[in-house]
Image (cartoon, rainbow, N blue to C red):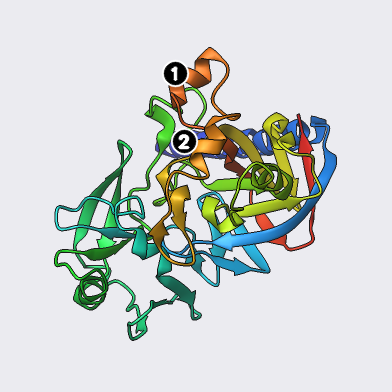
Amino acid sequence: MEGLKTALESRQVVVAALAAAAFATAGVAYLTWRTSRRQYVPVGHVSKIYVHPVKSCRGLEVGEAEVTKQGLRLEGVMDRHLLVLDKKDRFVTARTEPSMILITPRCVGDGQVRLEAPGMDPLNLPKPSTDGRVINVTIWDIEGEALDCGPEAADWLEKYFGNPGFKLVMSAPGLKKRCPVNHTRYKGIATDKDKVGFQEYVAMHLMTESSLDDLNSRLTKPVAMRVFRPNVVVSGSDPLQEDRWQHVRIGKAEFRKMLPCNRCLITTVNPETGVKEGQEPLSTLRSYRLPEDEKQKRLFGQAPLLGLMCGVEQEGSIHIGDTVYACV
């Protein structure tokens, strides 16, 4: 009897394993079918790619990057997975410290980052110790965990800002990522798979050159693409055509539109001087890019909209010159 019981249990394990494998295969097949059903058309080409290793610091313009579920990756360095905190462990951006936009994080290989800034000696960041201090970080009501990058990075930041209490933290592998699934703005749009480091809400931010050109035609002093801090810039499309894109494909990478991107005061900081320059381009954007439908008005209020906030459905590599496909 004991032998029969063991045989039955083994059979149940095998059946369960086969069922799980079949379910996984069916899931992959469904995703492939769903993707193949989308009617993609070419809309332009990738003209710029930006990776921002440290949130609100200068982005790196690169020729290629890897698209991951948590954002772009360059030489092992993730987009916006490093963050500056103040003495109360609140996140710091160029909204309150505009000069931080002049800090340039360089990728120096093997996932390492070097910080450079005017008047400062460069600092090669040590890899955070796995047993370092873990800090709970909240950005726009979405919580995550971060690893303290140590006193050397803190000293460097304090010297640059001229004030004590700053520190650098990392959204390290294995720590809790931030997920907007329950956030008021993204409820019903994000899923529990939309996890990020220190991006505002989602993994990818897309802009088009034509929409920037359209804005600049209305401005007395044109602004650069860097003002808007996108990850991917598309050339060759019509102005504001991206408003209608629901899915975007570049190579094997696929993105889904989650929401338009609402614009904030960081766009008023000159990325070359680190100085706020009045209310442009926000004032002009408000003249023609305010939310129109009631849902967007509830979500964004009086914030103008330009560009797309996207989740990543399929990972892959992207390069300058790649054809960009979209479906509406």
Q: Position of residue 2 (x, y in %)?
A: 40, 37
Q: Earlier in the sequence, mark 2 or mark 1?
A: 2
Q: CA distance from mark 2 to mark 1?
A: 56 Å
Query: Residue 285 — which label?
Result: none
The picture places residue 271, in percent across and down from the top left corner, at: 48, 62
- The quarter in which the C terminus is drawn is top right
**At 71% across and 50% down in the image, what residue appears?**
209
Return the residue at label 1. 298
Residue highlighted by disc 2: 9
Residue 62 image-quadrant placement = bottom right
Disc 1 residue crowd, few under 14, some 14–19, many 20+, Cα 10 Å: few
The structure residue drawn at horizontal position 14% and vertical position 67%, both measured from the top left corner, is 164
Mark yes or no: residue 287 visible.
yes
Report the front residue among 68 and 91: 91
Q: Which residue appears at 52% of the width and 33% of the height? A: 12
Residue type at numbered disc 1:
Arg
- What's under tag 2, amino acid-wise? Glu
Is residue 111 visible in this depiction of the protein? no
Establish if 52 lies above or below 239.
Answer: below
Residue 14 horizontal side relative to residue 169, left or right:
right
Asked if 267 appears above or below 124 in the picture, the reply is above
Q: Residue furthest bottom?
A: 121
Q: Secondary structure at mark 1?
A: helix
Q: Nearer the viewer, mark 2 or mark 1?
A: 1
Q: Position of residue 122 (x, y in %)?
A: 37, 84
Q: Nearer the viewer, residue 234 or 151?
A: 234
